[in-house]
Amino acid sequence: MTFKDKIKNFFKKLWQIIKKCALFIDNRPALESIILGVTLNLITEILHRHSLVEAIVHICTKPLPFLFNSLMIVTSIAICTLFKRKYFWMSLISAIWLAMGIINGVVLLMRVTPFEWTDLAFVKFSLIQIYLSNIEIVLVISAILLAVALLIVFFIKGPKAKVNYIKSGITSAVSIFLLVICLLVFRRTGILMSDHVKNLANAYLDYGFNYCFMCSVFDVGIDKPSQYESGDIENIMTQLENAADNNNEVNNAATNWVDGQQKPNIIFLQLETFFDVQHLSGMKFSENPIPVFTELQNKYSTGYLAVPSIGAGTANTEFEVIAGMSLEYFGMGEYPYKTVLKKTAVESVCYDLANHGYTSHAIHNNNATFYDRNEVFANLGFDTFTSMEYMQDLEFTITGWAKDDVLITSITDALDSTEGADCVYTISVQSHGKYPSIYDDKLKISVSGIEDDTLAHEYAYYINQLHEVDAIVGELLEILSERDEDTIVVMYGDHLPSFDIKEEDLSNGDLFQTEYVIWDNIGLERQYKDLSAYQLYATVLGRIGIDTGVLTKLHQNFSSDDKYEEWLELLMYDAIYGEKYSYNGKANYPYKTKDLQLGVKEITISDVIPGEKITIKGANFTTYSTVFYNDDKMNTKFVDSSTLIIDETVKFKAGDCIAVGQIDKNNNFLSFSKAYLIGGTTDNPSVYPDPDNVVYVKKGISLSTLILLIVASAALVSAITITAVHFLYRKKHTADKK
């Protein structure tokens, strides 16, 4: 026998062994489910850690969480063995679990927080383009389409199995039973977490991707506290009122500011990934990257700010500061902006200040629809919201984020838009990740102390963006200093950047701390105090004698009390999900959804000039302005803030309507100007509608909503198909027996 024949025989025998093993496994649904489930979970954990070795270490050190995560997949596979097309359903379920693991692995290459359910709600093509190149996007889409095509072919042409309903039924029942029992026991004993965790990344590492991801799906809202009764809330409210009456510091400040009718403007500057990078041990810079912030810390009130997230989660820090509520009591990885705040108005700094005559403005140089801010801000008490779609002269970084210098004009415009005092909440974005390692920009500040060249370049880019933001803060304060208005500016970082920073890398040793500074031109006494983000606005209001609001009084008077956290949870639950006892019942709940105005400057049309190209004249147009002709979207060319051109042939007739709509880069409709009517209105005004009454209905659908609809439809079709096939099989099986 030749060597070639020996090789052929070896592979022939090997193939026979594989076939026998496959047949052996195929006839044993329990073994089949276990092997596939454990294998898929191992792959998921390898992808999560980007390391086979670390995945094995996880199995050895956390065997029970690993087995539970495997059992989740095992159960889903076991159910598939009940159907004749089990090979297809097993392939589909396996593909879904594997796809989730792959997405999580890719996400962790770009940020430090893992993939969670709420990420699906934020999916926007424009956002994907920031993190992935066009080639990568094409490859991803191609891979998805190929996988879907293969599954369709497999469903049509794939083999059918002879189902042993007794074995498969027992396997499925036992799997489900074990899953439920283990879930209850493991959560009660602490093997799996049962409460909200602060460090989401560590939770995924400790308890496994599958379990944590499912928690992000189902674990939302605030659980009802065990001591929640009307009497409990009444007791708390009595003590809050008594403490507020006897708070000399706040009451004395009220004499100078509120009672004296001197109401300063209050500006919050939430700075993207901003923190004192000089806390990074072993890293050196050619100069101080944030000289303005450092000088402010030496002159004004400052301290550390405990924030609820790291590397991502801007909206959650934002929520804590605006609403004075702690994320500690919400579900794991929950974004209240995506859940309760889309339908419920809650107490906030805006509502509290409205009682003192303030107008509240939100400003963000990013999409209005990101985190659903265009809806949520109405439930946080804002009167106006200026997003990037309403800003002039936008410039962008090489990574696609808007630069922050545009915020200066937006802030002064907001202040100029009213005669009274203003609260302006500004959210920056310039120093947002992902940070490139290859770029042509000449960087002012160099970084040393990092051995990895790629990481060194990424840090250098980030540090220089931080330096630019710091300079913008200095420019803003200089402009505010020249205005004849009393002003307080509260500035702070929303979270640390998305680098793999460890606690030992920081001189302060805390990954969930940034720093804040309270600048003012009214002579406030300098104080040093460490705060949590949800205590910040109450602290600022206390400095000028304002204690309006239930949570405001709690933070100002009981932050050092043993009952503080317990009371905070009770009052939060009562306000959002409970009977609103602290407001004398639901009927007396004072917070109602505001009629949110987008932009502080009205977009208007003053004239429509005919010609080869129709010219629209008006005011406050931006690059996101689009002309609508009788509700039809026109190809629009932006010329300047007062001129738009319809870049197609249009023939107008009397009574036609022209409007300008603001549309973001994801094709979301945000707002429309008042309609401009073409001709005839003076001859017979009764024939034509009043321009103020011409209403344009929002149209279109966001990419994330479309994806969710497709997934939901596919799930519904799959469920109907499975039920129908199963019913027909049972009917045929019964007929054959007869």
Image (cartoon, rainbow, N blue to C red):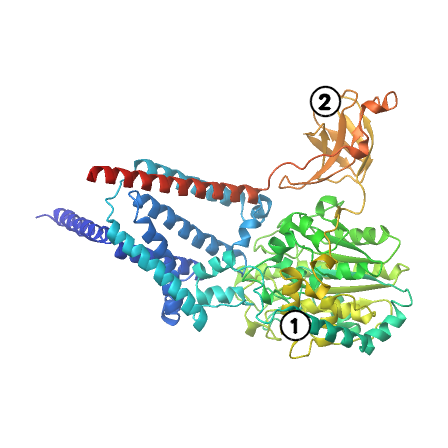
Residue at the left extreme?
A: 1
Give the Cα distance between marks 1 and 2: 67 Å
Which numbered dot is residue 388?
Answer: none
Q: Which residue is mark 2?
A: 650
Residue drawn at (89%, 53%) of the image:
419
Residue drawn at (43%, 63%) of the image:
208
Image-quadrant location for residue 42:
bottom left
Query: Which amino acid is tagged 1?
Result: Asp
* Placement of 113 over or under 528, stated as above or below: above
Q: Horizontal placement of 170 versus 589: left or right?
A: left
Secondary structure beneath disc 1?
helix
Counting from the top left corner in percent of width and height, residue 135 is at 50, 43
Quadrant for the C terminus, please: top left
Q: Which residue is mark 1?
A: 232
Residue drawn at (43%, 43%) of the image:
143
- Look at the numbered discs 1 and 2 and tell me whether their residues touch, using CB distance below 8 Å: no
Total marks placed:
2
Residue drawn at (72%, 37%) of the image:
661
Q: Is residue 467 visible?
A: no
Which residue is nearer to you in this view: 16 or 89? 89
